[in-house]
Image (spheres, rainbow, N blue to C red):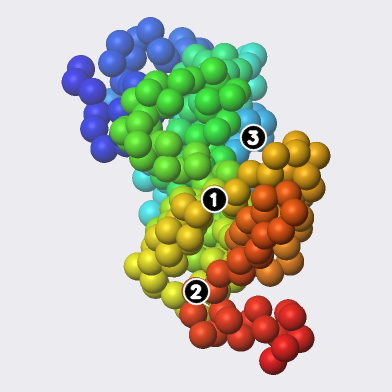
Amino acid sequence: MSKKKGLGRGLNALLSDSNIEDRLEVDIPTTAHTASSPSGGTLEISLEHIEVNPFQPRTHFDQESLQELADSIKVHGIIQPITVRRLARDQYQLISGERRFQASKLAGLKTIPAYVRSADDQQMLEMALIENIQRENLNAIEIALSYQRLISECSLKQDELGERVGKNRATVTNYLRLLKLPPDVQIAVRDNRISMGHARAIINVENPDQQLYIFKKTLEEDLSVRKVEELVRNLAHQNEEKPIQPASSAVNREIAQLQSQLSSHFGTRIVIKSDGKKGEIKIPFLSVEDLNRILDILKLH
């Protein structure tokens, strides 16, 4: 039997119908399900005998959306079977399809069509994460967190992860980098207040204080991705200027600490140049508005 296409190489590899005789559990019909369908390779399993997937990466399902699906199921029935694994006789556990499972209960169904697969706990987690990534309308942070779980909990390398989800290594890396952003920025991406394009531009700035400054400016002025990229380039040019290192390591530490404190206070990278006796403090600004902001902090405006 040829492999199905359309769900991505990763999920298709895990839930392939190739050699389905080796993948399907052989079961004798009981009160838990009716006779299996010879053509579809599915069983009608009692909803009461199915437990939810403990590895489900998504814990919240929109109730309005579930009710709409339940109403559709009442009219059309279950079009796509869920996938389960058998734990014991008349006892099953979801691998994928929890929305269909929950909506079927809302619709008042007693049984649901299901494919029965063999899977250990790690495969369960991997299947659930990949199915979640490929079928749900996830935001960039949710995708990044799912990628991170696949790497850390399923012991996958980035190349292997890319193969599983049908993405190249660069795409996987771009998502994972988002998790290095400050929490405020990650939350904004999650809540669709800024796009992944904005976030990818911001992450090119190494200083977290500058990242937050650009982020706040993006929200306040509703900046486009191109404008944010321009801001980042301007900051990179300013950061090329390095302070003169004083002879004393103790003074050097004090200067570095002071630079960090001032940078945090003003929301921009402060440069202190000193030869150990005298020097200068440089406060860069990116626009007239930014200058007025700094003057307000200095109480000079």
Q: Nearer the viewer, residue 211 or 244?
A: 244
Indicate whether 248 appears above or below 217.
above
Side (left or right) of 11 relative to 178: left
Q: Secondary structure at mark 2?
A: loop
Q: Amino acid at mark 2?
A: Leu
Q: Residues within 10 Å of mark 2 (few under 14, many from 20)?
A: few
Q: Residues within 10 Å of mark 1 (few under 14, many from 20)?
A: few
Residue 31 in which image quadrant = top right
Q: Nearer the viewer, residue 167 or 75?
A: 167
Circle nearer the viewer, 2 or 3:
2
**Residue tagged 3:** 52
Q: Residues within 10 Å of mark 3 (few under 14, many from 20)?
A: some
How far apart, in angstroms, are the residues tagged by discs 1 and 2? 18 Å
Q: Name which residue lies at 72% across and 88% down.
A: 300
Q: Secondary structure at mark 3?
A: loop
Q: Earlier in the sequence, mark 1 or mark 2?
A: 1
> For residue 242, which numbered disc appears in the image?
1
Q: Nearer the viewer, residue 138 or 84?
A: 138
**Residue tagged 2:** 286
Residue 283 in which image quadrant = bottom right
Q: Amino acid at mark 1?
A: Lys
